[in-house]
Image (tube, rainbow, N blue to C red):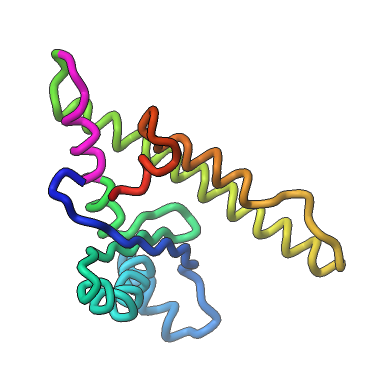
Amino acid sequence: MPSGESYLRDVSVTHPMSVEAAHLRRMSNYAGAVARDMEMVKDRKYKAICKEMGLEFVPLVFDTYGRPGKKTVEFLSVVANHAASRVRGGEDFAAVQGRIMQQYFKILSCTLQRFVAVNILSSIHSRRGQKGPFQAKPLLARDIAAFSIPGQGSEGASGE
């Protein structure tokens, strides 16, 4: 990032439904509750350790329906602002930043839904004792490339 900060990110996908009734009631109180709870879990686990190492920790959390956590939105906004500041031309900064954010969320939404589908299909195949035809790694490489800055490979997407 332009400020010289180094980030450590942890990606989590969590499901808002639970077999525990009390948990389900708590998570259904407001939209995004399950992502917020997972962000707090990740912060408790990693934030202090990262700070000791001089890293800024960011939990990147989505629920399985695609809702991002608040810290995910904040981090992507910082990345989009940085990317928008590098765009040359007469366009309005807010318009460029908005288009970049929109593109990021389209990519992330499609990636998330593909991985949910791959997990479901893999689960079906594993119950039958078979290896599924869908493998996550090639899908991930293609999606990470979409965040890359030309000439920097997939490292341009790291946010560091």
Closer to the camera in the image, 79 or 115: 79
Is 107 drawn above or below residue 21 in the view shown? above
Magenta includes 84?
yes
- The image shows a total of numbered marks equal to 0
At 32% from the left and 62% from the top, the residue drawn is 8
Q: Taking the image as drawn, is residue 141 in sight?
A: yes
Q: Quadrant of residue 155?
A: top left
Q: How would you classify the magenta stretch by its main secondary structure?
A: helix
At 37% from the left and 72% from the top, the residue drawn is 38
Is 160 drawn above or below residue 88 in the view shown? below
Most extreme residue toward the top, as rendered? Answer: 90
Magenta includes 36?
no
Q: Position of residue 126 (x, y in %)?
A: 79, 66
At 28% from the left and 29% from the top, the residue drawn is 99
Q: Taking the image as drawn, is residue 31 in sight?
A: no
Q: Position of residue 84 (x, y in %)?
A: 21, 30
Closer to the camera in the image, 83 or 13: 83
Is 115 positioned to the left or the right of 69 in the image?
right
Is 75 drawn above or below residue 34 in the view shown? above
Q: Position of residue 12 (x, y in %)?
A: 44, 64
Q: What range of the chain is rendered magenta?
A: 77-89
Is 88 positioned to the left or the right of 39 in the image?
left
At 77% from the left and 62% from the top, the residue drawn is 124
Q: Quadrant of residue 103?
A: top left
